[in-house]
Amino acid sequence: MDDKIYQLMRGLLGLALGFYFRRIERFHAERVPNTGPILLTSNHPNSVTDPFIIGAALPRKVNFMATVQLFRFAPLKRLLTRCGVIPVNRLKDDPKGMRSVMDTFEAVYRVLERGEAVAIFPEGITHDDPQLKEVKTGAARMALELEHRHGGKLGLQIVPVGLTFSAKELYRSEALANFGEPICAADFLTDYETHRKECIRKLSAEIEARIQALILHIPDLEQARVITAVKRLYFDRLQVGDQVVENSVTPRADELMLTQRISAAVQQIYRTTPEVVQGFAARLHRYESSLARLHISDEELAGFQNRTVRVRQSLLRATVAILLFALALYGWVFRLLPALIVTWAVRRFANLNKHKAQVSTTTIVAGVIAFGLIYTLYFAGFHWKFGWPASLWFGLSLPVTGLIAHYYLSAAQKLAASVRTTIVLLRAPSAAKRLFVMRQGLVAEIEVAHQALPTLRKENA
């Protein structure tokens, strides 16, 4: 019965995630054993959405830990318990109840001893910073203590997971769940009885390094800015020119791997010839400041260089805008009210400027409630008025035209930005010429580094 409830909830959460994210990719999910005890250790960049994505990405049941606060509502407690959620007391939940932490460990042990999977987030917090925070020792402590109890014969595997989001606060963005090679906990049991702390620290360091390898980890803010710029200016050339990864790699995983190489190259230049990258950063700042003064983006400027392609794209967008106007308007008529409720919920319960990690979770929960309830009311009213089968087709049309309305607005905004950029640059030809020269100079510098650095070339990828 519990497995059926878990599968039902997994399906519903997968459906909700599918509406929020345009694409969720799984990379190397085959590395996760189908049987036996496993401890999934992941970074935690996106609040409650993170366990949803891991759970939906794997065919086997995954148990999670959640704050004990959620278990104080009896009906929710029964549902969470049946779905394998393990309550954990945090200091901010109940400072006097910290003895229950050992109870949490024991609950995790019982699940793993049954040969099941448990996912935890060893950073201990969710955060907006894309960089991995310090990995706490709890995961290593649990793994080694349990494996020690069984004399190293339990076979516990620790699977690192790297979660990456293209823009976690934006509706219809993308996500990647990147699974690493399993770590055998028993391999770190040597001298555990006499040097327990050293074994725990060693395993924690290994877990941290494995997770870092699965995400884009940039410890320096200035380097992050340069890497972002290099990716924006040169990513398409690197992707098409090198073809560094096998054809089976998913698009987001491909992007992550190429971005990791760009990061490695930039960090190498910082170590060997810092004056080169500092000069590049200064010229980049002047270029970006010039763009900001004209209120145009690098993407729009790059598109303006090829006027034939730009005219074709604008004509295509205009044609699509005309053809889909009626459908988009229909979708927005019924989408507007629940969309406004979701927007209010995000502003009320998540701070877009300070807590982006909460935006997707709030949007998904509010969206399920608002769209589910209001679309149901629309359907009921239509059915009462027109009956079957008209109400069936009406109900099916709501989510489809709602998505069309969303993409229509996005395309219209791009068309407006394209037209505005064209007007600005045509009215200021000298400024346009200067920007093109600055951009070409930056791209030329990146090209020189591309040819010189093995970290950016295929043979060392």
Image: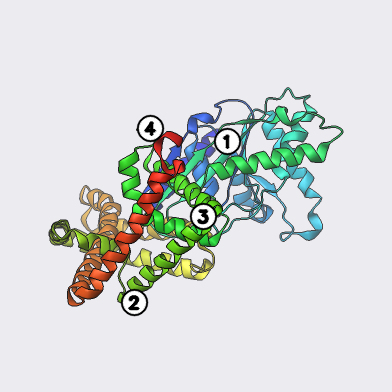
* Residue found 31% across the figure and 47% down from its top: 237
* Residue found 50% across the figure and 62% down from its top: 356
Q: Is residue 266 in view?
A: yes
Q: Which residue is mark 4?
A: 246
Outermost residue toward the top in this view: 153
- Residue type (three-letter) at the residue carrying disc 2: Arg
Residue 51, image x, y percentages: 55, 46
- Residue type (three-letter) at the residue carrying disc 1: Asp
The quadrant the C terminus occupies is top left
Q: Residues within 10 Å of mark 4 (few under 14, many from 20)?
A: few
The quadrant the N terminus occupies is top right
User: What's the CA distance linking mark 2 and mark 1?
Assistant: 59 Å
Q: Which residue is mark 1?
A: 2
Q: Nearer the viewer, mark 4 or mark 3?
A: 3
Depth order, front residue of 214/307: 307
User: What's the CA distance linking mark 4 and mark 3?
Assistant: 32 Å
Determine the image quadrant of residue 453: top left
Residue 281, image x, y percentages: 45, 64
Q: Residues within 10 Å of mark 2 (few under 14, many from 20)?
A: few
Q: Is residue 179 left or right of residue 70?
A: left
Depth order, front residue of 168/66: 168
Residue 377, image x, y percentages: 34, 59
Q: Is residue 35 left or right of residue 251?
A: right
- Helix, strand or loop for disc 3: loop
First along the sequence among labels 1 and 3: 1
User: What's the CA distance linking mark 3 and mark 2?
Assistant: 31 Å
Q: Residues within 10 Å of mark 1 (few under 14, many from 20)?
A: few
